[in-house]
Image (cartoon, helix red, strand yellow):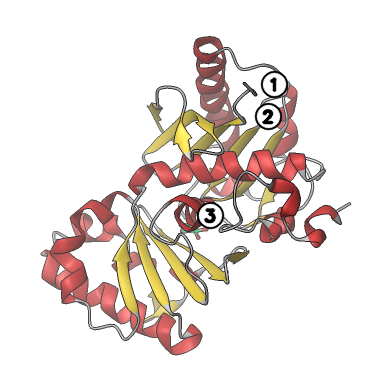
Amino acid sequence: MAEPRRAIGVDVGGSGIKAAVVDIDAGAFSSERLRVPTPKPSTPEAVAASIGRLVRRLVKASEVDATVPVGIGLPGVVLDGVLKTAANIDPSWVDFPITERLEKSLKRPVTIANDADVAGIAEMRFGVGKGRGGVVIMLTLGTGVGSAIFIDGMLVPNAEFGQMEIRGRPAERRSASVARTRRGLSWKAWASDLDEHLHRIDDLIWPDLIILGGGVSKNGPKFIPRLTMRPEVVPAQLRNDAGIIGAAVVAYERLTLGTPAAASTRATSAVAATTASATPAAAPADATTEP
Ligand code: BGC
């Protein structure tokens, strides 16, 4: 039997860093899921050291060889293998050469991408977005609000709906899941702030479907029925695992498509979330054209 296609997925969040070995075809973990608290301050060096420890533990426990790549979802805009924004992580991340730094220490290929983009890829391929065409928006509600746009299953990377200005400040300050607990709001009060944010997105993009992810998605019945949206709104299926699974998928497929690991995350746009996962070679031709 052929070896399973595997990659290590890492999800760097505001409170925890989570990692697992992922079976790319099944969209499921093939190891235990590890979690450590995000270091404070969350500098790139401190986070890189935590990622290094997690990856080494997984490699040892699951006997993955040196060709197995690592994909990392990070909470900011990703271009050319570096973060360009850092709203919910230490500002020293901006332009820090994290891909290079981790490839050197882990001695395996590393790919970074925006955390919501990779979570969206996992939901579109293995979760509630499977087979959904048209315009789909995935929002992750956590420490911040992450967003991903899919057009017929293709990602438009680095959408930042959490940063759009509502009532004079970034929308995520009111609609993130952390904003509810920080402000001690009822589900009803928070749902109304989230509703305002979703309406603003709808006014701009007119999506066919909105998927709400992040840990809070398990409480969907407490707030989704209170929303007054035109398009269908559904909770994510993979919940907090989506970020790890999607990061692994992106790492694996960029490599098999011949894209250098440290190249532009723009290559992520070529990851067709709904393409049958067993046929990476069938991904769009432009996926192979990145230098
Ligand atoms: C960042 C996004 C990120 C989101 C979720 C926001 O503050 O701007 O890039 O996807 O948080 O982590």
The answer to whether residue 171 of the structure is visible from this angle is: no
Q: Secondary structure at mark 1?
A: helix
Quadrant in the picture for residue 4: top right
Mark sitting on residue 56: none
Tell me the CA gap for discs 3 and 2: 23 Å
Indicate the amino acid at tag 2: Leu
Q: Compare marks 3 and 1 and give the one earlier in the sequence.
A: 1
Residue 220: x %, y % from top left: 21, 60
- Residue that badge 3 annotates: 121
Q: Residue at x 31, y 72 (%)?
A: 233
Q: Secondary structure at mark 3?
A: helix
Does mark 3 have its CB less than 8 Å from ligand 1?
no
Query: From the image, which quarter does the N terminus lie in?
Result: top right
Indicate the amino acid at tag 3: Ile
Q: Nearer the viewer, mark 3 or mark 2?
A: 3
Quadrant in the picture for residue 289: bottom right
Asked if the residues shown at circle 2 and circle 1 are in contact, with their CB atoms under 8 angstroms apart, the answer is yes
Against 161, is 207 above or below?
Answer: below
Residue 92: x %, y % from top left: 60, 45
Q: Residue at x 44, y 78 (%)?
A: 165
Indicate the amino acid at tag 1: Ser
Q: Compare marks 3 and 2 and give the one earlier in the sequence.
A: 2
Front residue (pair 213, 132): 132
Is 212 on the left or on the right of 149, as rendered? Answer: left
